[in-house]
Amino acid sequence: MAQKTALIVYAHQSVGSFNAAVRDVAVEELASQGYRVLVSDLYAMNFRANATQDDIIGDLKKPELFQYGEETMHAWMEGRLSDDIVAEQRKVEEAELVIFQFPLYWFSVPAIMKGWMDRVLSQGFAFTLEKMYNNGVFKDKKAMLSFTTGATQTMFRPDGINGDINITLWPLQNGTLHFCGFQILAPQIFWSPAHCPTAVRGGMLEGWRIRLKGLLAEKPLTFAPCELFDLSFQGGFMLRPSAREEQESQPHGITTGHHLGKPLPPDNQIKAPPPDPGSATAGCRK
């Protein structure tokens, strides 16, 4: 049996950070399961975040009006993308599992990780209009977010000051990763570790290690399949009338994004095994 590969795309500036400890647990545990673990340490690599024409080797197709997506698609097809992008794309191709490890910045990923997504997940390589969502290029791969927050868990509840964490995660999980076809595993969220006692942080890491042991057996999150939509410009890529009719009797919308004016389906973006009370937010200071 061929050895499986996992890729950890990691973004934190400090080697002594809690994110670094989370990364190290994942590397150790996955390696013990026989995985070949690749780590893209973006800050250590000085990975360039800005997407420019420097990402393309050779002449542009339309130099009079530079369009990054079109130009990088052609460059990918012709083997003319910059070496740093090609190296990361090869890692993605090899990996059955991709974990994004980061601190939540402004309700999203750090700029350097957003740059990785912008540049590495290029058109053609990661998606086309014919290959997207559940029919996407990476439909046989799994991906997940693993991140720390500065806020407590209560602050990201529907009645908390930051609003529902499900809505925060929708653009990343559906709009980026699932759009490329990835099966999305529930995120691993480390709530406010900087404000937790040492013992609680240790419990968080142990909970992560335990989850990693059965990670690949978990059922991915649920998203609206492409088959529910008219995938044509004439149909506007809109929900089919038959699908809309079927949804009329349902108490909730289809997904966090496809709510259809109804209540959001509970925890559509964060389904996960019940946390161990000793490894989650117990003991955290508010």
Image (cartoon, rainbow, N blue to C red):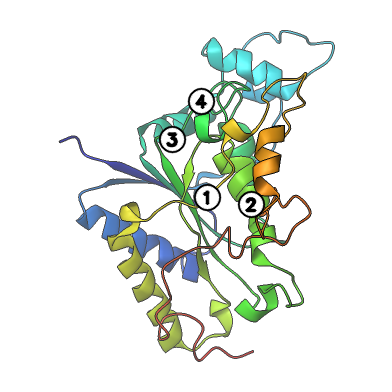
Q: Is residue 270 above or below residue 93?
A: below
The residue wearing badge 3 is 92
**Circle 2/circle 1 CB separation < 8 Å:** yes
Tag 2, which secondary structure?
loop
The one nearer the camera, 171 or 263, is 263
Location of residue 26 (image quadrant): bottom left
Question: Residues under labels 3 and 1: Cα distance?
Answer: 22 Å
Amino acid type, residue under disc 4 in the picture: Asp
Distance in Å between CA atoms under marks 2 and 1: 8 Å
The residue type indicated by label 3 comes to Val
Mark 3 or mark 2, which is nearer to you? Answer: 2
Mark-to-mark CA distance, 4 and 3: 14 Å
Which numbered mark, 2 or 4, is in the foreground of this view? Answer: 2
Mark 1 lies on a secondary structure that is loop
For the residue pair 199 and 180, the one nearer the viewer reads as: 180
Q: Please give the label number shown on residue 83.
A: 4
The residue at 37%/74% (across/down) is 207
Local packing at callout 1 (Cα closer than 10 Å; few below 14, some 14-19, many 20+) is some
Name the residue type under label 1. Thr
- Residue at 15% across / 36% down in the picture? 1
Of label 3 and label 2, which has the lower sequence position? 3
Which residue type does callout 2 highlight? Answer: Thr
Mark before the other along the chain sequence, 1 or 4: 4
User: What residue do we see at 66% from left, 76% from top?
Assistant: 151
Q: Is residue 191 left or right of residue 256?
A: left
SS at circle 4? helix
Residue 114, percent across and down?
64, 45
- Marks 3 and 1 in Cβ contact (< 8 Å): no
